[in-house]
Image: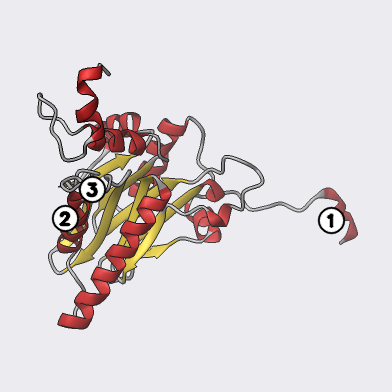
Amino acid sequence: MQPGQMAYDRGITVFSPDGRLFQVEYAREAVKKGSTTLGIKFKDGVLLVADKRATSRLIEPESVQKIYLVDETIGCATSGLVADARILVDKARSQAQNYKITFGENIAVEKLTKVICDYEQNYTQYGGGRPFGTAMLMCGTDDLGVHLYETDPSGALVAYKASCIGLGRPAVMDFLEKEYKDDMTYSAALKLGLKALETAIEEAPKAESVEIGVCMVGERFRILSNEQKAKEMGAPKATKSKAAKKEE
């Protein structure tokens, strides 16, 4: 960047002459380096699939989390800076609980997403802070139906039938543009999501290397266990060794 542009680069509250906020754009770059995470709406619900492959064999896989329960019927998946994502998830949970205590009912998915986006936008408008370096896929069901929203570090949100955030977004979005169909079954959506993820990570997803969250109409949002993922993904059952068979 040229010396004359450094002021625009450093100040979150200052627009560049061509109308850009560089710090927001840098936050988007942080999201692009995050794990590939996608969401797909199907006939009776919405599905989240996230790549959670460990970068080292010394890492405990259970400690890596990309999908979170927000409220009974709302969940989210994140990509980007993990610490920033955790703050936004805590904010979403707090807002959902406050709404339930005040009004005696669950908050709508769109309303909660807009609250989080307003919170993010504040950090692009005032000095002394920086934008959140994370994007979120907010999903859930309410009286208005099934919803999937994508948030941006700028505080913008867009509703999608299927979307992806993170490192593999270009490849996954290109795949989903061609293969997505309305009113898919849960099984078809899961198969599509895993195949889309495979196009980004260039290897077949395994039960222990992906995280899956599901919310269906009339049910609570749930994050599948390793056993459930293996069953849903059709992983082959473990076979007994020849030595074990001889002992029997």
- In the rendered image, is residue 77 in sight? yes
Q: Residue at x 30, y 68 (%)?
A: 93
Compared across the picture, whether 26 is left or right of 114 comes to right
Residues at marks 1 and 2 touching, judged by CB atoms closer than 8 Å: no
Q: Residue at x 34, y 29 (%)?
A: 171
Q: Position of residue 244 (x, y in %)?
A: 84, 56
Label 2 is placed on what type of residue? Asp
Q: Foreground residue, 127 or 184? A: 127
- In the rendered image, is residue 187 in sight? no
Instruction: Tell me how far mark 1 sits from mark 2, CA to CA.
Output: 60 Å
Sequence-wise, the earlier of marks 1 and 2 is 2
Label 3 is placed on what type of residue? Thr
Residue 213's label in the rendered image is none
Q: Which residue is mark 3?
A: 151
Q: Which residue is mark 1?
A: 244
Instruction: Tell me how far mark 2 sits from mark 3, CA to CA.
Output: 11 Å
Task: Write down the quadrant of residue 214 in the picture.
Answer: bottom left
Q: Position of residue 146 (x, y in %)?
A: 20, 59
Q: Residue furthest right?
A: 247
- Density class for disc 1 (Cα within 10 Å; few <14, some 14-19, many ≥20) is few
Residues at marks 2 and 3 touching, judged by CB atoms closer than 8 Å: no
